[in-house]
Image: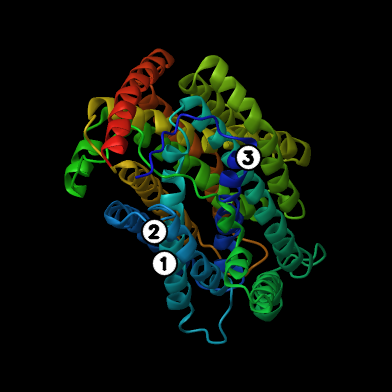
Amino acid sequence: MKCTVLDQRLSFCSKLCFAIGGAPNQVAGSATAFFLQIYLLDVAQINPFQASMVLFIGKAWGAMTDPVVGFFITKSKWTRIGRLMPWMVGCTPFVVVSYFYLWFVPPFTNGRFIWYLGFYCLYQTLITCFHVPYSALTMFLSADQKERDSATAYRMTLEVLGTLVGAAIQGQIVASAHTLKHCPHHNMSTVKFPPYVSHSCYCIFFHHRMHGALWAWFRVEDRNQRNCLLTLSDLIPFFPCTDPYISKTEKQIPFHKGFILVMRHSPYLSLTAAFLFISVAIQLVQSNFVLFCTYAVDLRDHFQNIVLTILVSAVVSIPLWQWFLERFGKKTAAFCGITWIMPFTVMLVFIPNLVVAYVVAVSSGLSVAASLLLPWSMLPDVVDDFRLANPHCKGFEAIFYSFYVFFTKFAAGISLGVSTLCLEFAGYDTGACRQPAQVAYTLKLLIGAAPVAFIVTGLLILLFYPISEDVRLRNKLCLEELRYVTHKSLLSECILH
């Protein structure tokens, strides 16, 4: 019997390899977050009601798959590469295929709604099979809270870099297809987009990326080398996924009992509810920003560069927030970081010029970084607090992470569906270069007033989050004692075997 106690410091290589695993997911996620809505409306040319249904049902379906995947993960058997890695490795090739067809315009027109709804739901299901075990892997990296926080900071930095890459590539494609060719400045009348041009611009990058990956895969004869070429996600190292707090002889609690215990844990409920509203606000800004720049203000030639500025600012500021949370605490960092975005988004609505747009982009990047880093840094503290309250529970990590993603995805799906439906009621003209004034007004509300309202609500809920720095340090000391006792028990089991 092999005994492993995860109290060691993580090396730079281990943190980097763990962080790389989240980058491909964010490359795809940023493209869908920023550009899927305008793609469905102006390239696939389905009406706003159908687009809202695709976005809402797809997000809601993805939300529902999170607890289902979490359930099956808790029931999975341990393998020589752990319980989580088979899920991540197995689903990756299918994620690539479903993502490719999500950005493919089929030759028929009547069934496009079903096409995009089907592939978006399939993509959400498969990406959940990767993301839930990957995020839960954080709890198995180390028993040291500081090491987990550091690994999370590495992960967020690489994920924002992935977001930057996805937005950069997709943004340039959208800009070249949507603005320069189809909406010339000398003719701003209602012009319909030729779907074949936009289709080729949107899909050519993904076609060549898929073709190159498959070519490299078939050129390599060794099966292990092939698996490494499928995706960067396979660079995640095989961490020893054992629970350092529970003796091997103790049985795993049933899923329904673990779910009830988790849902009764007040720190988890307050953290999830707070970042649910905050993530909805960020999602509203992300999904409507390109439409806002295109139709509400005269920034259609600059939106791709503004998006890149936001993401570069987010990448640069993640180490700043990591230092800030270590110096002043995570709850304080959350309040300072999230609040920062509110005055600047309102400023862009009322002063829509290019200089203000770039100032807002830099400032918004700071808040985007905080909204990405803080929940994933605070969630392990909640899990530790739960461990102390329920010391005999085992195998519940996937429940925490899957239901956190479930609630945030479901709320984001509702907000996306409602926001796109608002454009339908405002009279959005699919494929037109100029929209009615009511559409511009609706986009200003979706970028300014609505996110501010959601952020204020989330921060008010966060006031009730009970894990302060004092509580976190106390939990850390108690867990060290618990781990010491468990380590002695594991040593006894090793001797007996």
Q: Residue at x 46, y 77 (%)?
A: 115
Q: Residue at x 66, y 31 (%)?
A: 317
* Numbered disc in front, either 3 or 2: 3
Q: Secondary structure at mark 3?
A: helix
- Kind of residue at badge 1: Cys
Going from N to C along the chain, the mark reached first, 2 or 1, is 2
- Residue most extreme to the right: 186
- Kind of residue at badge 2: Gly
Q: Secondary structure at mark 1?
A: helix
Position of residue 95 in the picture relative to residue 160 (left or right): left
Going from N to C along the chain, the mark reached first, 3 or 1, is 1
The residue indicated by pointer 3 is 157
- Kind of residue at badge 3: Thr
**3 and 1 marks in contact (CB < 8 Å):** no
Q: Secondary structure at mark 2?
A: helix
> Which of the 4 quarters of the picture holds residue 397?
top left
> Which of the 4 quarters of the picture holds residue 421?
bottom left
Q: Tell me: residue 486, above or below residue 355.
A: above
Position of residue 205 in the picture relative to residue 102 (left or right): right
Classify 10 Å Cα crowding around label 2: few (below 14), some (14-19), many (20 and above): many
Separation of marks 2 and 1 at Cα, in angstroms:
7 Å
Separation of marks 3 and 1 at Cα, in angstroms:
28 Å
- Residue most extreme to the top: 470
Q: Residue at x 51, y 47 (%)?
A: 284
Along the viewing direction, whichever of 382 and 294 lies nearer the viewer: 382
Separation of marks 3 and 2 at Cα, in angstroms:
24 Å
The residue indicated by pointer 1 is 121
Position of residue 397 in the picture relative to residue 211 (left or right): left
Q: Position of residue 355 (x, y in %)?
A: 78, 37
